[in-house]
Image (cartoon, grey):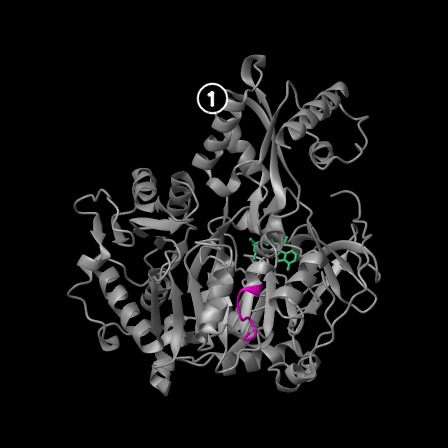
Amino acid sequence: MTDDIAALFVENRSYPPPADFAATANAQPEIYDQDPDAFWERAGRERVTWFTPFERLSEWNPPYAKWYIGGTLNACYNCVDRHVEAGAGEKVAYYWEGEPTGDRSVFTYATLQQNVVRFANTLKRLGVRKGTPVAIYLGMVPELPIAMLACARLGAPHTVVFGGFSAESLSGRMNDMGCEVLVTQDEAWRRGRPVALKQVADEAMASAPGVHGCMVVRRTGGEVSMREGRDVFYHEASAGESDDPATCPCEPMDAEDLLFLMYTSGTTARPKGIVHTTGGYLVGTSATHHHIFDIKPDTVYWCAADIGWITGHSYIVYGPLCNQTTSVLYEGTPDQPDKDRWWEIVERYGVTVLYTAPTAIRTHMKWGPEYADRHDLSSLRLLGSVGEPINPEAWVWYRTHIGGGRTPVVDTWWQTETGMILITPLPGITTLKPGSAARPFPGVEAAVYNNEGKEVPPGAGGYLVLKRPWPAMLRGIFNDPDRYVETYWSRFPGVYFAGDGARIDADGDLWLMGRVDDVMNVSGHRISTIEVESALVDHPEVAEAAVCGRADAITGQAIVAYVTLKGGLDGSPDKLAELREHVAGKIGRIAMPANIVFTPDLPKTRSGKIMRRLLRDVADHRKLGDTTTLADPAVVQEIQARAAAGDAKEE
Ligand code: PRX
């Protein structure tokens, strides 16, 4: 992070909004003229129903913000009950598609409410009350949003752990949050095969002694072991429970009460519990969802992320339900049973808005447009992208082959920490440029700083910062105030440091250029280099490890590890496979290195610091940067030769 970021890339294509879209869009050009406070004040009144109205808009004691002060509300009431009370009980909330074909169900707002109430009543039997921390470890089954909403109804904060994480990752999160109850399922469907979630949960609970109750949702009917006095099947425990909302009223919560924690990777081995509270989060997610995805009463919206990540929390569950949206929820992978599964789903439900990640788009691109061509996708009117920089070729392919050359494509930038989209086009206003996330959402103020904390001129690159607080921003890192200050608020005084490189062009549009810290972005998921290194070094035969991301045509980045074994041993293909599995066991399969290069030594400075910059150069086949500060310059040549030999074998 010592050099200012050079911005070299120039993209000249541009796409003004279609006239008919612009004419009826929720967001009209005046939206940018509003004063930020006036914008959020109004959004706070319009988007959310308060039990007690807020007295003051916000308070900013850097680096701590509060929003909608004095207001009380309940997220579940806003997402479910109020729509039923308003007469929309028959409207579809979720069309659920299981991975095995033909496995489908429909939840209206009324049936969603019944399910949530019954779930909440059953959670009460396990001792869940206002303030009880609950962990949720489920695949994309309807019980996932239902369990989250049930927690919100009771005022019990949740942490959802993505189903691909290991037992150790799950127990680490449960212990950090102090979870007392865990909701999981027997097995999840993934790529046509069952994945044993309860078994992983058992292992996790063995080292999370605070968890005294475990609710198990039956999905596949696969064999699981149940511990007497701790584990209950949901279908059994819920049998006598009422689904009448009067039996389980929505708990009034303060706007600043904890709604959930979402753990995310940072630049150390320990994931951070990002704190999201209730009022600002709900206003922020619903306002952005309404304007950016141009949600209408008849919209059929599909965010193809997993609810286990922030995208799913904000834009599958809380934002869309708060806006009374009809959504699609899909359990599985895009190639089950064939590579046209997504397009079959779009056609079946008449999806009008699709939101996904560049990795998925590039995967479909690789498979070829013929799979999309098999289906009628003419219902689509808007496409969205999130999670990583989208290369212009993928953007144009998406618009052409999925959007029929008509739909706007909104490239939305945000983070687990920001809670809501912050930088984005507005589809009825913005002239789109492939690869640019355009400009800050109304009420949001961003800038690009150089190393010295000065705003860069148009055309120059630097670090993305946010200059004023926004409603859905993180309220801290759970149990770690120092790290909160250090990570986000110490690089440049008074502004939020996002950790992303960016460039601002002559029109004021922003171009995101990837992480500037030791965080990799693999398929839109954040993985810390140090977390993977720690997992490798945890293996008894590993002496040292250094990890970096290399460019990958599909996943954006892929993980490369450089490993030195103890006793000067050389690695073998078996050892490589064993180490990959070891990382999967420690963190989860998403963190498995794509390649491991065994090397007798790592490139270090004379003071013993590993020079990751050089390893990144090797991984990306770039000319090596300055090697003069190395203790032993020969090491890097050896690594280069070994990496090249490994690449040849991979091909
Ligand atoms: O580097 C940015 C990248 O993803 C990071 C945030 O990751 P996470 O907290 O997992 O949240 C992902 C989903 C919101 C950011 O720091 N990122 C996200 N969206 C974009 C992006 N990079 C470029 N363009 C985007 N649209």
Up/down of 61 relative to 518, above or below: below
- Image quarter (top left, top right, bottom left or bottom right) of the N terminus: top right
Mark 1 crowd level (few <14, some 14–19, many ≥20, 10 Å Cα)? few
The answer to which quarter of the image holds residue 634 is top right
Count of marks overlaid on the render: 1
* Quadrant for the C terminus in the image: top right
Magenta-colored span: 373-379
- Residue at 19% x, 71% y is 242
Ligand 1 is within 8 Å of the C-beta of the residue at disc 1: no
Describe the element under mark 1 as helix, strand or loop.
Answer: loop
Above-or-below relation of 309 to 527: below
Residue hosting label 1: 540
Residue 250 in view here:
no
Residue sitting at the far left: 240
Q: Nearer the viewer, residue 364 or 388?
A: 364
Q: Amino acid at mark 1?
A: Pro
Q: Position of residue 44 (x, y in %)?
A: 52, 78
In which quadrant of the rendered view does residue 103 lie?
bottom left
**Ligand 1 quadrant?**
bottom right
- Residue 244 position (above or below residue 238): below
The x and y percentages for residue 14 are 77, 69
Q: Is residue 82 magenta?
A: no
Identify the residue at horizontal 48%, vertical 83% (top origin): 297
